[in-house]
Amino acid sequence: MTYPSGASPTAVEATVEDLVTVVVPARDEAGFIGACLDAVQGQDYKNLQVVVVIDGASRDETGAIVQARAAADPRIEVVHNPQGGIPRSLNTALAAARGRWLVRVDAHSTVEPEYVGLAVSRLREGNWGGVGGRKDGRGVTPAGRAIAAALGSPFGVGGSVYHHGVERQEVDHIPFGAYPTALVRELGGWDEELVANEDYEFDYRLRSAGHRLLFDPAIVITWHSRQTLGDLYRQYRRYGHGKVAVAMMHPKSMRPRHVLVPAFVGYLGLAALVATRRPGRAAAMVAPYALALAAASARTAASLETPAERANVAPAFLAMHIGWGVGFWAGVASALVGKLRKSR
């Protein structure tokens, strides 16, 4: 694509007729893909190319469901990623994209009818390299509803504005972002070596190239969060592990909030050692966190309806924090082992 003299990919003139490519990576999403596509097909903005990428590891009826939708709606196109992995699925969709704007929608999510139109209207302002909005969790089990509430708490997710922000602002990362397609291609798409945090790594490269990211809370994606504490722990362990790979690629991408939780988990480990000889001192060491956990859990539980839901809030916070911290240190260990093997 060529640009007018002096223009950038974020400042090209646009009209309401612009084609928008909606990208939906999908793996084993038979239980969710129908609702997701209902939401995408119901957008107020009608000029869409909907690219659904079927992950090669998918083993359920996701592909058949999407093929049936494609037969009924020519806007839907099915492509395949035999090798699997989200970054590769995103790049597969990027190769097939024909739209001026690219909007990612997670297969585990639903969006309101104005979602695409709002995202594109912000991109058309010409000030932003990417736009994203609120990622609101949704639970269908008592633990799932507690997890969704915990994800909306700053105590749980820290500086991840997209989980709890209420004001439009510039940020360092957006979930399921919307971007000018030409800009994504210019940046080389997503890094296929990453198994997690590929979206944060892409946003870091985008910002390093001089572009800005906008968080707009009017743009809301409702995301089916994990529904058990074990799944939540494993998810955050994977996130923490993946953060190390991104940090090794881009050391300057690290923020204080990224090391706070791993430092806390290390501190808990120290407290556990102290407890073997001086349990009272160990209890004093963890008391500040325990008090903060109790206060945050009480505030968050107030929005929930049943005792079973409220009882799962504190464990959800613990699963997130400990999972992320343990994953981070496991990532550090893996990185060190990898370096030692290369040095031999």
Image (cartoon, grey):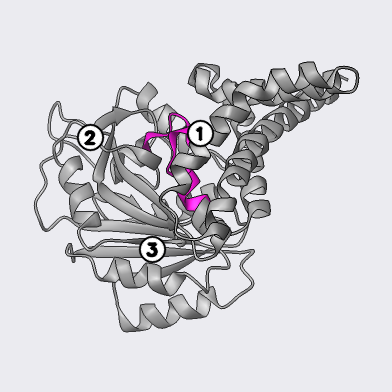
Residue at image point 45% right, 70% down: 33
**Is 153 part of what is drawn in magenta?**
yes
Label 2 vs 3, first from the N-terminus:
3
Q: Earlier in the sequence, mark 2 or mark 1?
A: 2
Visible in this render: residue 254? no
Image quadrant holding the C terminus, namely top right
Q: Nearer the viewer, residue 328 or 12?
A: 328
Q: Which residues are magenta?
A: 147-162
Q: Which mark is residue 168?
A: 2
Query: Does residue 333 sit above or below 183 in this rendering?
Result: above
Could you tell me which secondary element the residue under label 2 belongs to? loop
In the image, what residue occupies the spot 60% across and 22% down? Answer: 288
Which residue is more in the foreground, 189 or 113? 113
Task: Identify the residue shown where x is 51% and y is 73%.
Answer: 31
Residue ID for mark 1 = 295
Q: From the viewer's side, name the closer residue of 58 and 42.
A: 42
User: Is the C-beta separation of discs 2 and 3 under 8 Å?
Assistant: no
